[in-house]
Amino acid sequence: MKHLPALDGIRAVAILIVMVSHVLTPVVPGGFGVTLFFFVSGFIITRMMLSQGFKGDHLKAFYVRRFFRLAPALLVYMLVSGLVMNALGYPVPARDFFATLFYYANYHQFTNYGHVLSPLVITWSLAVEEHFYFMFPIVLILSGRHLVSVLVTAIVAILVWRMVLVYGFHVPTARTYVSTDTRLDSIAWGCLLSVLIDRKHVFLARLAHWRALVLSAILLLASFAIRRDDFRETLRYTLQGAALMPIFCALFWSRAPLPWLRPALESRVARYVGNISYSLYLYHFLVLAACTATISNLVELKIAAFAGAFLLATLSYYLIENPIRRFGSRLARSMEESAKPGVQAV
């Protein structure tokens, strides 16, 4: 599968939105940064699977790649977080570690230290993505040529389910914001666009039109401007997912507009930030917790949080993520080669 450098730039935009919201000002919609991450994940994973004609014999290799891509950096982050928080007098309970390790952090109530949040709270979105990784390959294999219909049905069903929870059961905001059953549609939108592009669907021409981009901008602005809790926890994610479709189509479909956007996202700085975005997503929250506990000056706190996050994320990427990910990719390729007809495993 050919790498799309602009996707690194989109990851950079997503993580910067999250960091600015957490570190500088909550006025910036940090939740949209997470939604953008979800969309990118669905887009990339689906594109990867479709490009290789994904079948049952690819499952092991897929999970090997995912494990070596995500788990090592997360395990080191958990260790560092435990040591740092314990040294600061805020020990992380074992139950919080278990929730992160076994990917149910989005359904777990993490320890609250008052003015300092647990650095493991941020792993809720990793749980949502991990649940997607477990489910989607099976959905892809079973749905076959009906994948578009399955994805559209899932997107509509999750929206209806959110509305039932909010209007029928009056669940708290946190329930719909972090739960897998209410957020998987943000990933499914990315999956859907990837399938449409792969199949050169006739609908792409409408998505790539400038009118669709204008509508996309209106939908995004509406999702940010409307502050009612019931709207934000029901329709907000649907509007944002739909709005991202034309934008991504404009980037990755050859006949689309916005020729200036892709070069900006493919710049060296954007790609660097995008490459370290996973570790940056993790460590910015640990550094923010540590700075909140030790620095009283607000300006110094914000500067230290940004600088510390980039330093630790860079170290994590080059010392842990990249080397182990490459090993995992080699191992997965060898598994795929041995599964080919006429090839014997040594």
Image: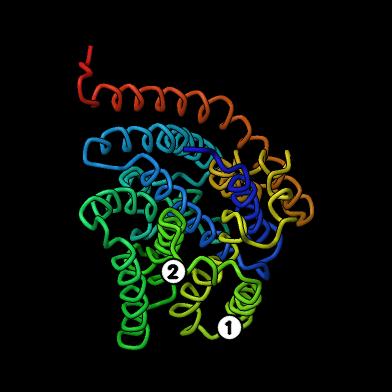
Amino acid carrying label 1: it is Arg
Q: Quadrant of residue 233?
A: bottom left
Q: Position of residue 162 (x, y in %)?
A: 36, 77
- Badge 2, how many Cα within 10 Å: few under 14, some, many 20+? some
Q: SS for tag 2?
A: helix
Q: Position of residue 175 (x, y in %)?
A: 38, 71
Q: Is residue 169 above or below residue 92?
A: below
- Badge 1, how many Cα within 10 Å: few under 14, some, many 20+? few
Observer-nearest residue: 178 or 138? 138
Q: Which residue is mark 1?
A: 227
Residue found 30% across the figure and 60% down from its top: 147
The reply to whether the C-beta atoms of the residues labelled 2 and 1 are less than 8 Å apart is no
Amino acid carrying label 2: it is Tyr
Give the quadrant of the C terminus: top left
Q: Which residue is mark 2?
A: 177
Q: Position of residue 70 (x, y in %)?
A: 43, 38
Residue found 22% across the figure and 16% down from its top: 345
Residue found 57% across the figure and 43% down from its top: 4
Q: Position of residue 212 (x, y in %)?
A: 60, 74
Q: Quadrant of residue 243?
A: bottom right
Mark with earlier residue (2, 1): 2
Q: SS for tag 1?
A: loop
